[in-house]
Amino acid sequence: MRPVTLLPRKAAGWLAALTAWLLPAGLALAIAIGEPVAFETEAQQRQYQTLIRELRCTVCQSETIHESNAALAADMRRRVYEMTRDGQQAGAIVDFMVQRYGDYVRYRPPLQANTAVLWASPFLLLLIGAGVWWQIIRGRKRMTQRPSFTDQERLALDRLRRGE
């Protein structure tokens, strides 16, 4: 005798699969939301939000500490929170992070001698691309220009075309 179920077997299988997929996704979302942070003033809240979006996670690939779920990013967020709550200005917090992790922690590094290549490279690549494009266009113009033949060369060409 078969056991009585409310759902057919296929539906029960789909429900189990859906639960198996949605449960981890829901847990990941709950973890990603993170813990709420409370500040005394709205200005501190804005400063904190700005800083966590401007500081880079040093162990992640191009993620801010706001976006990253790495343990180091959580520590950096906690440190920014504590320093902001203690009344430190944004510049002092950024200077602390730069002193601790180097200029890489800034999502937009300052223009210095050691970062000049980073800032100039997009413009240099654009100039090189424009130069290559210009050379290609000039080469095409030369190829499309027909050479001018003398009368004698035209007659010889006509004879070759006719097969004489």
Image (cartoon, rainbow, N blue to C red):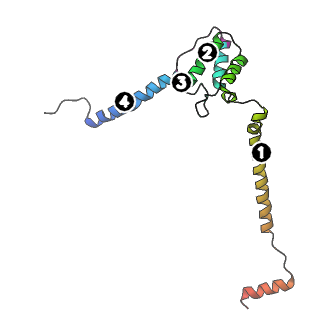
Residue corresponding to mark 3? 71
Queried whether the magenta region covers residue 118, the answer comes back as: no
Residue 50's spot in the image, x, y percent? 66, 21
The Cα–Cα distance between marks 4 and 3, rounded to whole angstroms, is 28 Å
To which quarter of the image does residue 117 belong? top right
Comparing 137 with 76, the one in front is 76
> Residue sitting at 56 percent across and 24 percent down?
72
To which quarter of the image does residue 103 belong? top right
Query: Quick check: 131 left or right of 67?
Result: right
Sequence-first disc among 4 and 1 = 4
Residue corresponding to mark 2? 81
Decide: is 57 above or below 158.
Answer: above
Comparing 61 with 6, the one in front is 61
> Residue sitting at 72 percent across and 30 percent down?
109
Residue corresponding to mark 1? 124
Residue corresponding to mark 4? 19
Q: Which amino acid does label 2 sit on?
A: Tyr
To which quarter of the image does residue 11 belong? top left
Comparing 153 with 122, the one in front is 122
Sequence-first disc among 1 and 3 = 3
The answer to whether mark 1 and mark 2 are in CB contact below 8 A is no
Sequence-first disc among 2 and 3 = 3
Seen as rendered, the residue at the extreme bottom is: 164
Q: Give the range drawn in magenta.
A: 34-43
The Cα–Cα distance between marks 4 and 2, rounded to whole angstroms, is 36 Å
- Which secondary structure class fits the magenta region best? loop
